[in-house]
Amino acid sequence: MRFLGIDYGTRRIGLAGGDELGIATPLPALVVAELAGRRRALAEVIRQRRIDEIVLGYPLNMDGSAGFKAKEMEALAAELRAEFGLPVHLVDERLTSHMAEQGMNQKQLREIRAKGIVDSRAAAVILQDYLDQRFPPGLPAADDREGA
């Protein structure tokens, strides 16, 4: 199975890939100025990578309520489901950008953000959260459980 994690923003779309091994890896972000161009580029990534499931960051408010941006992501999830016929999972993305910036050179952070590196690292955090729930780490492989 191929998973695509998405941190969808108004300027950049952070992307991450993963599979049933349970490890999310940042991919190059989509840095396209116009909305239609970002959507076309995202569709191309989904097709080229033969994605099976999409994991979309869900920007809840700190109190857990769904605001305007969360409603936008619900609409985007519905559009992606309709266009590609794929499952789209909404995953809480609170504080993922902060986590993605950890360990980065603070002096170069502006340039790093402009390239979409933070966005793709945030997408990897979002996808990793989902993969950890779907494929919990630490479970023995099927061969190990059978006493092989």
Image (tube, rainbow, N blue to C red):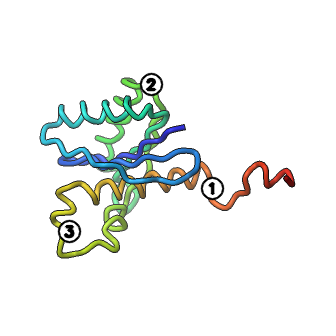
Whether the residues at callouts 3 and 1 have beta carbons within 8 Å, the answer is no
Question: Three-letter amino acid code at disc 2?
Answer: Gly
In the picture, the disc for residue 109 is 3
Mark 2 or mark 1, which has the lower sequence index?
2
Q: Looking at the picture, does residue 10 appear above or below residue 112?
A: above
Question: Viewer-nearest of labels 3 and 2?
Answer: 3
Kind of element beneath mark 3: helix
In the picture, the disc for residue 44 is none
Mark 3 or mark 1, which has the lower sequence index?
3
Q: Quadrant of residue 112?
A: bottom left
Kind of element beneath mark 2: loop
Question: Three-letter amino acid code at disc 1?
Answer: Pro
Q: Residue furthest left?
A: 33
CA neighbours of label 1 inside 10 A, class few (<14), some (14 to 19), many (20+): few
Whether the residues at callouts 2 and 1 have beta carbons within 8 Å, the answer is no
Question: Three-letter amino acid code at disc 3?
Answer: Leu
Q: Nearer the viewer, residue 60 or 127?
A: 127
- Residue on which the image places disc 1: 136
Q: CA distance from mark 3 to mark 2?
A: 37 Å
Q: Nearer the viewer, residue 86 or 66?
A: 86
- Residue on which the image places disc 2: 85
- Residue drawn at (18%, 70%) of the image: 108
In the shown orientation, is residue 84 left or right of residue 115?
right
